[in-house]
Amino acid sequence: MLTIAELSAFILVVFGLFLIPGPAVLLTITRSAHEGTKTGIITGLGIATGDFIHVLVAAVGFSAILMTSTAAFTIIKITGAAYLLYMGIRTLLAKASSIKMPDVVQESLLKVYRQGILVEALNPKTALFFLALFPQFVNAESGTIVTQFLILGVIFVVLTVIYTTILAIFTGTIGQLIKRGTGINRWGQKVLGLLYIGLGLQVLLLGS
């Protein structure tokens, strides 16, 4: 199971990810600004559901791989660490781009929820994030892979719900900061880049 240090590192990386506004964050802010806090919260719940879909797929996939070969899981873990290192360097070197808010039309809460699910579930970057990050915190000798993935997934989903709810409640202030704050976006990229590099190096050099 996760140690306190591993759990803290995982949460730190997740918060680093939150610092860079992606499609899900921008959708939450836009929905909240146009249709109110309630709609923004529902959007966030849809996004969290999309995240959990990724978790379930990854958990089943990695569990099947481990049943075939523990060496294969180790290779995937090292490959994921190398990918995190690459993403860290790429994130550090990338220039902060301008933020473009998505266009939305007023819809029922059910459709808003579905849109949140689709935006996150169909985002290939989210899939790569889970495939690269989660194995770094999974130990094949410490319980079943599915259980460990689900624990990490629930933590990630809970943090996502908390974060998107805060965005929905304070959408006016946060939305203006994101739209105008290229400096904030740039520093967010630096923090996330360093976190990726640190985690990738830890696995590649220390093997854990």
Image (cartoon, rainbow, N blue to C red):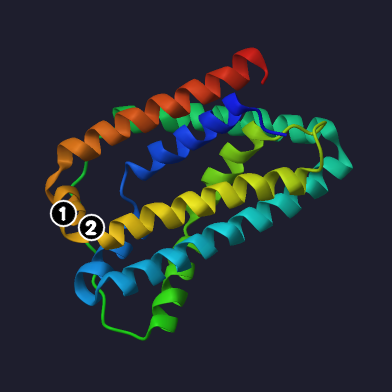
User: Visible in this render: residue 135?
Assistant: yes
List the residue tagged with mark 1.
173
Which residue is rendered at x = 54% and y = 18% of the image? 201
Look at the numbered disc 2 and give the secondary structure of its residue. loop
**Is 100 displayed left or right of 84 in the figure?**
left
Q: Considering only vertical position in the picture, is 54 above or below 18? A: below
Residue sitting nearer the eye, 71 or 109: 109
- Residue neighbourhood size for the residue with mark 2, other residues' Cα within 10 Å, grouped as few (<14), some (14–19), many (≥20): some
Query: CB atoms at circles 2 and 1 under 8 Å apart?
Result: yes
- Name the mark on residue 26: none
- Where is the C terminus found, in terms of image quarters? top right
Please identify the residue farthest to the right as the structure is shown.
Answer: 68
**Percent of width and height locating residue 177:** 16, 48
> CA gap, disc 2 to disc 1?
6 Å
In percent of width and height, residue 34 lies at 20, 74
Of 149 and 103, the residue lying toward us: 149
Q: Position of residue 91 (x, y in %)?
A: 35, 33
Q: Is residue 83 visible?
A: no
Report the quarter where the N terminus lies. Answer: top right
Q: Position of residue 126 (x, y in %)?
A: 49, 51
Disc 2 designates what residue? 170
How crowded pointer 1 is (Cα within 10 Å; few <14, some 14-19, many 20+) is rated as few
Q: How many marks?
A: 2
Residue that sits furthest to the bottom in the current view: 108
The part of the image, by quadrant, that contains residue 192 is top left
Give me the residue at 71% from left, 50% from top: 59
Q: In the displayed structure, does residue 130 sit left or right of residue 33?
A: right
> In the rendered image, which quarter is residue 75 located in?
top right
Q: Secondary structure at mark 1?
A: helix
